[in-house]
Amino acid sequence: MLGEAVGLSRFDARRADSLSALVGRQEEIDLLLRRWNQAKSGAGRVVLISGEPGIGKSRIVESVLTRLEDEQHSRLRYYCSPHHAHSALYPLIVQLERAADFEPGSSADARIDRLEALLAPATKNLTRDVALIAELLGVPSDGRYPALAISPQEKREMTLNALLNQLSAGTVQTPGLIVVEDAHWIDPTSLDLLDAIAARAANLPLLLLVTIRPEFQPSWIGQPHVTLLPLGRLGRSDSAGIIDDVAGGKPLPEPVVEQILSRADGIPLFVEELTRMLIEQELLREASDSEGLEGSRRSLAIPATLQASLAARLDLLGAVKDVASIGASIGREFSYELIAAISALPPVDLDAALERLTASGLVSRRGSPPQASYTFKHALVQDAAYVAMLRSRRQQLHADIANTLIESFPALAETQPEIVALHFDEAGRVREATDHWIKAGRLAHARWANREAANFFERGLRCLATLPQTRDTMEQAIDLRFDLKTSLFPLGQFARIVGYLREAEALARDLDDPGRLCLASVHMCQTLSLSGHPQDAVKFGRDAHRLAEQLGELSHRISASLFLGLACFSTLHYGESESHYLNVLELLDGDARLRQFSLAGFPAVTAHGFLARIYADQGKFARGIAHGEEGIRLAEAVDHPYSLGIVSWCFADLLASRGELNRAVVVLERGLAVAREWNLPFLVAGNSGSLGHAYALLGRTAEGLPLMEQALRVFEKMGHRFAQALFLSPLGEAYLLAGRQADALRAAGQALTLARENGQRSGEAAALRLLGEASSGGSSPDQAEGHFRAALALADELDLRPLAARCRHGLGKFYLKAGCPDQARDELVAAATMYREMEMRFWLVQAEAELSGLPDSLLHGSHNPV
Ligand SMILES: Nc1ncnc2c1ncn2[C@@H]1O[C@H](COP(=O)(O)OP(=O)(O)O)[C@@H](O)[C@H]1O
Ligand SMILES: [Mg+2]
């Protein structure tokens, strides 16, 4: 079990010496204890303890933990830190390392043993989870466990799941208490996990306490099991209580107390520190008086701010202050080993300085040297020690820290390059900082921590911009922008990507570098296709394709063809699109079909999927089905969730447009399950949206509509305008089937606008047909004919045969209603003939039923007997 033994928290470490007695806060603590009692019974609770720094958030948590010490429960604590606000899963990694309690210098094997013991009680798949967690902690597990052959994204999901299960497993035997300190500094991946555990808490015997500064607003505020507990400042008598406690047996003169109360204004940290400072100042003065020193008789100087009072306390430490400054440059927490490597002091003096610092209460110690680690009492104390230094001294220290990390702490430098980067950056060592930011970004991306990765790459870019422009730095500046594209793409940040790619393109032109220019165009083509600019995408795609052919590089040729195929598909250059996808399949002869080329999906699978869609729109169903089935087979063979998700969606759309709805449902339900299992938001939306449409066509509109509406919301949020336009017409059709005329008209109108803006002409035709359907039953039937005719003209022009058939079908029904049986018969017969040719039985049956309602005389007079 991951839980901690009592005696490991920051407060525990200093409880004995410097924790003042708690004053006030009775109501807050009562509330927390009530929440605990509710949580224990299975209705879990989340409490956000919110307030400015130094107000007493951590102190309240500490009191609650102390009160619960005699109760059976499991306990987990996480600390977030500003240095690590972008290091994926940092608080969890630290907690795991602490819980595993690795012996210093122990072998990888011994560490794996520890991890096994730690994780075993709460996992169903020990081998897998140990492998995942070992990798997270940078413990080599090769040889003992086979490497997991899965993508970074899959690994991220599995790791988060393993952690989440460990977190909730703690509550199986006894109720659980999880504390997350300073969540305003949480990294994005840990926040995902926190979101998940906060949601799960509602149904577990679990109390989740999260301390935050008020600017942090998690998404779960406002849910019924979540309480926001804002901490106000202390009242006078409570503040006076702290002063008394700190002063101990020696009460301060009334006017001094008065001054402290008015300056510190109810912030406990301020009260505490101001009091301590004044006492220490007084002690110094007494000492100097008794030695009869001249000139030391100063009046009591009372700092006006919390920062100034902390600075004053550090000043009183004299030479020890420098050790505090080194520590502060390292972080809120620093190890003895690291500070010893950096400080110029002889070991005896260093030890003495650290002892004094600890005795002052400004820093607490855990363990004993050389294994000791030190923590600043408060983040503001660290800040004060940090800003007390001159800039040049700070830079020197940061450079020393970075170099020491690389030389003496290689494991840490490898697993957290961002920390090395941060120190080089602060040291003004831009070259080294850039390299380490890039390293950190790539490592984060490899763990699918894309928000973290993008942050690191952007910091690298900022450093790079200050270096002289040479061929090297320019090449690096281009590649960094490609890295940024790779991390931002899964986040759907298309506008930002386009900005970076334009810069990359310009740089590649300046450098006259065809390879990088080709890649810039490939990325641009892909991004623009999906974000609703297919016309521009086609231009970039053609450039990319031409350059790739000239260069003859296989991976460039594959990706250029693939994305140009997509762009041409969206703009209805079907012939061109088809030829590019076929080209991909040709290039990927034999075993190459099983290669991924660092693309999201296996290119051969994607090509099969899109060929299925192209043939579906053209009504060449047999050919499309062959590609769809082959794509599914291949995705299964490579066992790749993203590929399976994308081809399921494409293939099922073909089946649905042919009217094979039950089969489409089977394919989509599987695609959706895979996409959900692997948390692939784009494919969850795609498969569930199409599934909703299939349900609606089968008459299950109540199930179908919410799926489609949700999918659209996701696409909208992602900026996937292509997919949005694709789904609006089917949504309108579903509204119509549910008898919601007005909603259908609205969806059709939106579909038309978006398709026209995007230049998606098939979307435009589909939207026009829907407008026809929606208005023929509504208040403006006279407009229906025009819409159907416009849709039909476009469908004929673009050779979209299934859509043309459905336009004629719609027209036929319209004429029936309008009392024009002759015209109705012609259109319905034409529709039925096309349906029959394309084997679209689902609609053929409907068209035939409508025809059979016509008078015999009309039918027999027809030139197209049914
Ligand atoms: N109610 C209180 N009674 C006594 N001391 C307190 C109280 N609240 C805070 N303190 C002290 O003030 C300091 C800052 O409190 P802390 O909980 O660390 O602040 P926060 O976590 O809100 O930044 C700590 O040293 C703490 O012991
Ligand atoms: Mg705190």
Image (tube, rainbow, N blue to C red):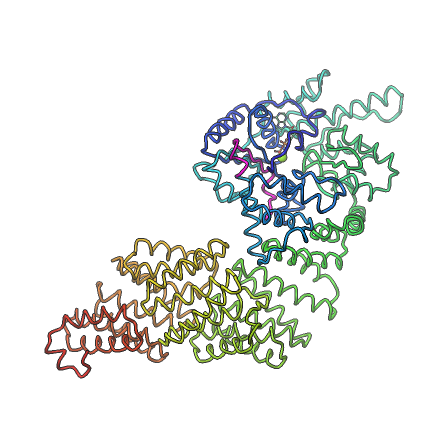
For ligand 1, the image quadrant comes to top right
- Residue at the spot x=71%, y=16% of the render? 251
Q: For the C terminus, give its image quadrant.
A: bottom left
**Side (left or right) of 754 relative to 861:** right
Residue 363 visible, this orientation: no
Displayed quadrant of residue 571: bottom left
Q: Specify the segment rendered in magenta.
A: 169-188
Task: Work out whether 367 lies above or below 188.
Answer: above
Q: Is residue 144 visible?
A: yes
Locate residue 106 relative to residue 844 in the image: left or right: right
- Quarter of the figure with the N terminus: top right
With respect to residue 308, does 262 lie above or below? above
Q: Is residue 111 left or right of residue 616?
A: right
Between 548 and 296, the residue placed more toward the observer is 548
Seen from the viewer's position, the closer of residues 134 and 732 is 134
Look at the picture and state if 275 lies above or below 708: above
- The residue drawn where x is 39% and y is 73% is 761
Q: Is 166 placed left or right of 515 in the picture?
A: left
Q: Quadrant of residue 477?
A: bottom right
Q: Is residue 181 magenta?
A: yes
Q: Position of residue 440 (x, y in %)?
A: 67, 55
Residue 775 inside the magenta-drawn segment: no
> Where does residue 53 sit, x and y in percent of width and height?
62, 36
- Residue 263 at what x, y percent from top left? 65, 28
* Image coords of residue 214 (percent x, y): 55, 39
- Residue at 57%, 58% in the rendered image: 150
